[in-house]
Image (cartoon, rainbow, N blue to C red):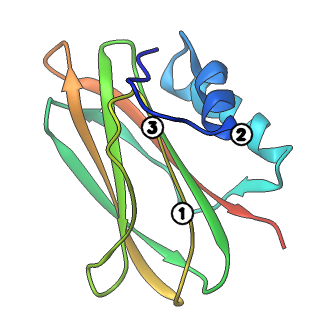
């Protein structure tokens, strides 16, 4: 996996090693297993997947609860070398973003308010006409 030249935390390293050389569904299933040990569980409305061409993007609204901690993970296929994520509150302000040069993106934040947040995924680098991606949103148990 191409992780670029930047510092990553232990969680980032664990996620990257869990996702090496697997389909996007297999990658997310491995992330599920890893994050369950950290008390993060998928939220019902939190999946976003499909295919995007280079520089293509897709947005999905998520209903989030104030004070809850969320982790959002995005992965892409072997033809992708850079997927980016960002999440915006109802005022359009960026709450968190991951624009590092890598094929695994993650956001970690606590929702400031109840309400809709817009999750954006961008396929920044793809070697073919399009690349497959999968994004899953997790909430930390109380």
- Distance between mark 3 and mark 2 Cα atoms: 13 Å
Q: Residues within 10 Å of mark 3 (few under 14, many from 20)?
A: many
Label 1, secondary structure: give it. loop
Q: Along the line of sight, which residue is nearer the eye, 131 or 122?
A: 122
Q: In this view, does 92 lie to the left or right of 14?
A: left
- Which callout, 3 or 2, points at the residue further toward the start of the chain? 2
Q: How crowded is mark 2: few (under 14 residues within 10 Å), some or many (20 or more)?
A: some
- Distance between mark 1 and mark 2 Cα atoms: 15 Å
Question: Residue 63 placed where, x, y %?
Answer: 50, 77
Tell me the number on the disc at residue 134. 3
Q: Residue at x 53, y 86 (%)?
A: 112
Q: In which quarter of the image is residue 110?
A: bottom right
Tell me the number on the disc at residue 32. 2
Judging by the rendered image, the residue that carries numbered circle 1 is: 45
Q: In which quarter of the image is residue 50?
A: top left
Q: In which quarter of the image is residue 96?
A: bottom left
Question: Residue 69 placed where, x, y %?
Answer: 66, 69
- Which callout, 1 or 2, points at the residue further toward the start of the chain? 2
Vertical position of residue 95 compared to residue 132: above or below: below
Vertical position of residue 29 compared to residue 64: above or below: above
Q: Which residue is drawn at 50% across and 51% down?
A: 47
Q: Along the line of sight, which residue is nearer the eye, 115 or 51?
A: 115
Question: Residue 33 placed where, x, y %?
Answer: 78, 35
- Distance between mark 1 and mark 3 Cα atoms: 13 Å
Q: Choose mark 1 or mark 2, whichever is in front.
A: 2
Q: Choose mark 1 or mark 3, whichever is in front.
A: 3
Label 2, secondary structure: give it. helix
Q: Is residue 43 left or right of residue 115?
A: right
- Which callout, 1 or 3, points at the residue further toward the start of the chain? 1
Q: Is residue 8 left or right of residue 32?
A: left
Q: Residue at x 75, y 44 (%)?
A: 35
Label 3, secondary structure: give it. strand
């Amino acid at each position: 996996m191409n992780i670029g030249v930047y510092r990553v935390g232990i969680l980032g390293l664990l996620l990257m090693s869990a996702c090496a050389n697997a389909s996007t569904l297999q990658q997310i299933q491995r992330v599920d297993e890893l994050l369950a040990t950290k008390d993060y569980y998928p939220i019902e409305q939190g999946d976003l997947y499909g295919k995007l061409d280079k520089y293509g993007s897709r947005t999905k609204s998520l209903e989030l609860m104030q004070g809850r901690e969320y982790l959002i993970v995005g992965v892409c296929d072997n033809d992708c070398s850079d997927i980016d994520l960002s999440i915006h509150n109802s005022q359009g302000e960026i709450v968190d973003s991951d624009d590092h040069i890598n094929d695994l993106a993650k956001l970690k934040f606590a929702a400031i308010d109840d309400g809709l947040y817009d999750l954006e995924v961008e396929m920044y680098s793809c070697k073919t006409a399009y690349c497959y991606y999968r994004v899953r949103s997790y909430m930390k148990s109380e």
